[in-house]
Image (tube, rainbow, N blue to C red):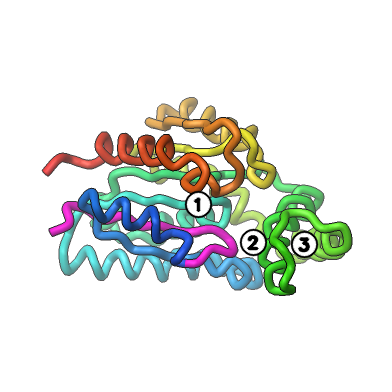
Amino acid sequence: MPRHRALLIGWLGSTPRHLRPLARHLEARGADVSVRVPDTLRAMATPGGWARQGRAIAAQLAEAHAADPRPWFLHASSNAGFWSAAALFDALDPSVRAAHRGSILDSAPGFPDRVSPRFTARFAGRAMLPGLLAALGQPPAHTHRWLTPPVSALLGAWHVLAPRQVRFMESSLARMRAAHTDAPLLLLHGDADALVLPEYVEAFHRACLAEGLRAERVTVPGATHVRLLVAHRAGYLEAVDGFVRRALPPG
């Protein structure tokens, strides 16, 4: 019988297939794994969209915990996974929160405490383009000669028209730290990530340490966005396994 649970939350454009290699690895080491893929566009489209996603995931965890209480840990990827996780912690039942043993943040967080329309236009546009290009039958990329300008302009306008969603994103940094006063964090990121710049992960890590949190940061040289497991498998899994061993009780 699995000894603990692992909740994997993917990134914008991910599918359960993308998360399956990590899920299999964790299952082989005693975890009962659940996979969630953020519905990022729906979360961004309406006020309270991230909160609704968080409540849905929290309800799933509460149901599983009521039937079979076990310690659990979170693995969230990119900003979409980070925001989903922040909303999840806001909605957790106290008994499920008490069973939380730590979180791994992969390629996140990638934004400052105050997000400007220019920042949203630039980086949200980069995040959206791979899925848009794939839908058009084109190779995925974070920039495109013709599509980048209109997509960036659209997202800059969204920023101005959606202040509630923007405030949620900004406040998620502090709320994520507050959710880990009694549980450790592992930040995994690449120094070649053009979507989640290393400087934002480093700033979040410094803020964690300043608040006395147990936060580790592992930087993988040459790794790009959410590609650490694919391109740097051995080191990535070693870091994940080490964290799980330290965070979860033996048995």
Q: Which residue is mark 1?
A: 77
Q: Marks 2 and 1: in contact by CB < 8 Å?
A: no
Q: CA distance from mark 1 to mark 2?
A: 19 Å
What residue lies at 80% left-to-right and 64% top-to-bottom?
Answer: 151
Q: Marks 3 and 2: in contact by CB < 8 Å?
A: no
Closer to the camera, 205 or 160?
205
Q: Which residues are magenta?
A: 1-15
Q: Amino acid at mark 3?
A: Leu
Earlier in the chain: of badge 2 and badge 3, it is 3
- Say few, some or many: other residues with alpha carbon within 10 Å of mark 2 (under 14 / 14 to 19 / 20 or more): many
Q: Using the image, tell me which numbered label, if any, was put on residue 132.
A: none
Q: Using the image, tell me which numbered label, if any, was put on residue 165.
A: 2
- Say few, some or many: other residues with alpha carbon within 10 Å of mark 3 (under 14 / 14 to 19 / 20 or more): many
Q: Amino acid at mark 1?
A: Ser
| Residue 7 colored in magenta in the image | yes
Q: Marks 3 and 1: in contact by CB < 8 Å?
A: no
Q: Secondary structure at mark 3?
A: helix
What residue lies at 64% left-to-right and 66% top-to-bottom?
Answer: 44
What residue lies at 69% left-to-right and 73% top-to-bottom?
Answer: 135
Q: Decide if residue 152 is on the left or right side of residue 32.
A: right
Q: Amino acid at mark 2?
A: Gln
Q: Which residue is mark 3?
A: 155
Could you tell me residue 32's position as x and y percent? Answer: 25, 59
